[in-house]
Amino acid sequence: MELSDANLQTLTEYLKKTLDPDPAIRRPAEKFLESVEGSQNYPLLLLTLLEKSQENVIKVCASVTFKNYIKRNWRIVEDEPNKICESDRIAIKANIVPLMLSSPEQIQKQLSDAISIIGREDFPQKWPDLLTEMVNRFQSGDFHVINGVLRTAHSLFKRYRHEFKSNELWSEIKLVLDAFALPLTNLFKATIELCSTHANDASALKVLFSSLILIAKLFYSLNFQDLPEFFEDNMETWMTNFHSLLTLDNKLLQTDDEEEAGLLELLKSQICDNAALYAQKYDEEFQPYLPRFVTAIWNLLVTTGQEVKYDLLVSNAIQFLASVCERPHYKHLFEDQNTLTSICEKVIVPNMEFRAADEEAFEDNSEEYIRRDLEGSDIDTRRRAACDLVRGLCKFFEGPVTGIFSGYVNSMLQEYAKNPSVNWKHKDAAIYLVTSLASKAQTQKHGITQANELVNLTEFFVNHIQPDLKSASVNEFPVLKADGIKYIMIFRNQVPKEQLLVSIPLLINHLQAESIVVHTYAAHALERLFTMRGTNNTTLITAAEMAPFVEVLLTNLFKALTLPGSSENEYIMKAIMRSFSLLQESIIPYIPSVITQLTQKLLAVSKNPSKPHFNHYMFESICLSIRITCKANPDAVGSFEEALFMVFTEILQNDVQEFIPYVFQVMSLLLEMHKNEIPSSYMALFPHLLQPVLWERTGNIPPLVRLLQAYLERGANTIANAAADKIPGLLGVFQKLIASKANDHQGFYLLNSIIEHMPPGSVDQYRKQIFILLFQRLQNSKTTKFIKSFLVFINLYCIKYGALALQEIFDSIQPKMFGMVLEKIIIPEIQKVSGQVEKKICAVGITKILTECPPMMDTEYTKLWTPLLQALIGLFELPEDDTIPDEEHFIDIEDTPGYQTAFSQLAFAGKKEHDPVGQMVNNPRIHLAQSLHKLSTACPGRVPSMLSTSLNAEALQYLQGYLQAASVTLL
């Protein structure tokens, strides 16, 4: 694409259309942009637009489109084409920083993100001058520019907070510190001075405090991995200023908004985080500053109001206290009973209260409430922080703290009993307190794994939780219902099984509650109970115990999906999946209605898939329905195909990218259920599966390969007779896959199925070409993974076509090639093969080469006979060689970037492991002994003399054992 006005105009028009609410206008525009994004100059046209366009909406749209383009295409993936040409890359890096700094804030943020995406790949090696360019801008004195630099630096360096330690990371951080630490410190001091100069100028203070927040965040990132020498030497400057900022209160920075945190709150919260980081990781160096931070943060907590805008600040402040009180050498600060009482009374109890804002979230923003409460994304809520502080204090003061709180719990419950409809919040706080007191260690998978001995959980459950869940109305006191259900979920390992069984019908009943939170919690609690393990690795709750509830459970779960706000509720769908898995054949009578409801749901969500977890569990549930029903009645597969194929066709025709990998997996499962022939409905689809566009998306590759394998297993003859013209297309797919280091194993899966199932005549003309392609790949890039797959393939070929055919095809490509493969690949590498079936294939194949290949006995290949036998005995007896050469580093499929949905494996669509050798050979060792006996009968005296001259003693001993076990001797 030329950098021309005409192209800028075209691009403007299409960007406008992408904002249109009408999908008929929006979709084609998105498709057009997708089709041109590979063109040279496309990114530069976007940057020109966001700089020069007169319309703000186009500028913003161009900046977002540019950022997403960079996100999808900047990373260069081995084996895949470079999606952005080199000249565009150079131009982008040369222009993006100045452009970002001169743009308005809304666009600055998008470009700043784009810089950090580029930086993640190119900085520092391929973009060495980025830092210098950024640091130089600090001198500009223009805080719009300075904040742009700080924002970019923050998005570049924040990954240091979660990267694993490595030499590469250390050297990058060192490079950053050398260039950045001093200018950042000077900027920090200068900004603080400017704050006092402009103490009465509200607009100046806003800009300066925005800078201070970013500086404080950068401090956290740069100090996270280790304490840098520079910051240790300058700790006085940083900590003194941080402390004075914590105690600062400027009326001009206070906001009237009760919801949104202001700049002052955001800065103080980040400083609490920074202090907590030092208190936890660098306590020795931080010791002189700690007492004054504890005092300042304590004062903050006691004087800060209950408004939502202070939530982050209060929770970070409490988290600071929590991290301090767990450290043995700060223990003395908390020992005094009065201090403990004061913390409990002034910090913990007030922050456990259920506020009006929480009630509002519970009713009107339930999805967010659930995410915070159930999934622990409530790191920055007051309740979670108070709960962590209770746990921290219990580490050294469990007795006194439990004592203090027991009093509170009792008085709260008494208050509730006086007037439940008015005082229900007291009971809510009491349940929360008991929960945080009792739970010492918790995991998502198992709930509480360690509990406080001083709290009687079952008694509390029977007296205070069950009555709420047994009450006549499921809609009364929804918050207390949710608390009760959550209690069961959290303490499922501590509450006796009989109490859990009593709870199950109560939970099923609460699936009908109007409150989204209540019915979601009920579904989640059931799902968690169904995954608990009992003795002998079975489920704690059995299908037999669930028998009386099957119908009401399934009815209520599917009904819950029709409640307002829950049409795509992932917890309900996960509970449906788990119920199917637990109940197994007891769901069969309900399958016709269930599969209808699942298919309707699938059709509805395929119009606009937005909930990946929900979608995943929905497909898992479909797979379970198929598996369970067809296990009892294999002929039922046809009725599932009838129910599902219309929706599947629509998904494939509309190219619903998120669902296509799932559809292929379900189709594989259905096709594998067929016994003999491939139904014609599948054959009609076969040519479409070979279209190159489907194979472009990494997420499609594993399920598509599996589906093609199913076609080959069930209908190789049909393909050979009715679709022989498609065989080159099938081999084209193999050729594409084999060229990629990430997907070559998938290419071998396909090739092995072709060799195993296709009638020999149909692939004769292609065989030599297949081997030539494999050798080219071996020469160009030989990886351990490729070698392992190659070994399995040649041995499978040998089993299928005979050892002589294998030797002949190698030697037809190049004289003596067979010997080279034996000497350079099979003998030295066979130990690397892993997996039961793979080892068996190799053992049977090598046995055939040893005993059914005449050239091995009377040509120059004979010298390789004993080393090959020795390698085979090694494969049987030595541990697997799992070393991988240093320079090899595979790109996992999961790591390839791009917006395509990565492949999501459906657990319940699992493919049974297939053994191509099967019953033909049960024990490969005995098979070797019998084959050697047969060979020695054909040429007496040869085999023992070859063994005695060159097989090592240990291998010989093993071989004697095989011969004895097979009751044969060598002649």
Image (cartoon, helix red, strand yellow):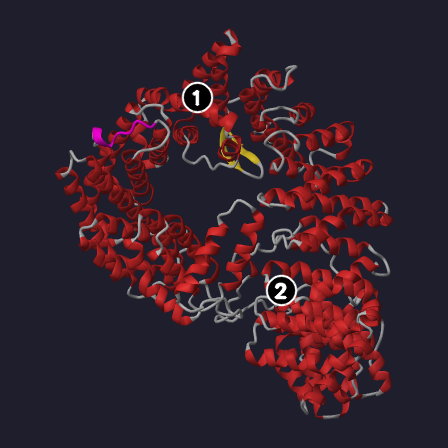
Report, in whole angstroms, how far the alpha carbon at label 1 lies from the one at label 2: 53 Å
Q: Which of 841 and 558 is in front in this view?
A: 558
- Left/right placement of residue 49 relative to residue 789 reads left
Residue 504 falls in which quadrant of the image? top right
Nearest to the observer: residue 644 or residue 703? 644
Left or right of 161: which side holds 133?
Answer: left
- Amino acid bearing label 1: Ala
Point out residue 883 in the picture as x, y percentages from the top left corner: 55, 68
Give the residue pinned by disc 2: 693
Give the residue at mark 1.
356
Q: In this view, does 265 lie to the left or right of 775?
A: left
Q: In which quarter of the image is residue 408?
A: top left
Tag 1–tag 2 contact (CB < 8 Å)? no
What residue range appears in magenta? 251-257
Q: How many neighbours does mark 2 have within 10 angstroms: few (below 14), some (14-19), or many (20 or more)?
A: few
Q: Position of residue 297 (x, y in %)?
A: 28, 31
Question: Could you tell me residue 85's position as x and y percent?
Answer: 44, 70
Q: Which amino acid does label 2 sit on?
A: Val
Nearest the camera: 942 or 8? 8
Q: How many labels were placed on the picture?
A: 2
Sequence order check: which comes first, mark 1 or mark 2? 1
Callout 2 secondary element: helix
The percent position of residue 547, horizontal first and vertical second, equals 78, 30
Q: In which quarter of the image is the C terminus?
A: bottom right
Residue 971 seen in the figure: no
Q: Which dot marks residue 147? A: none
Between residues 775 and 802, which one lies in front from this camera angle? 775
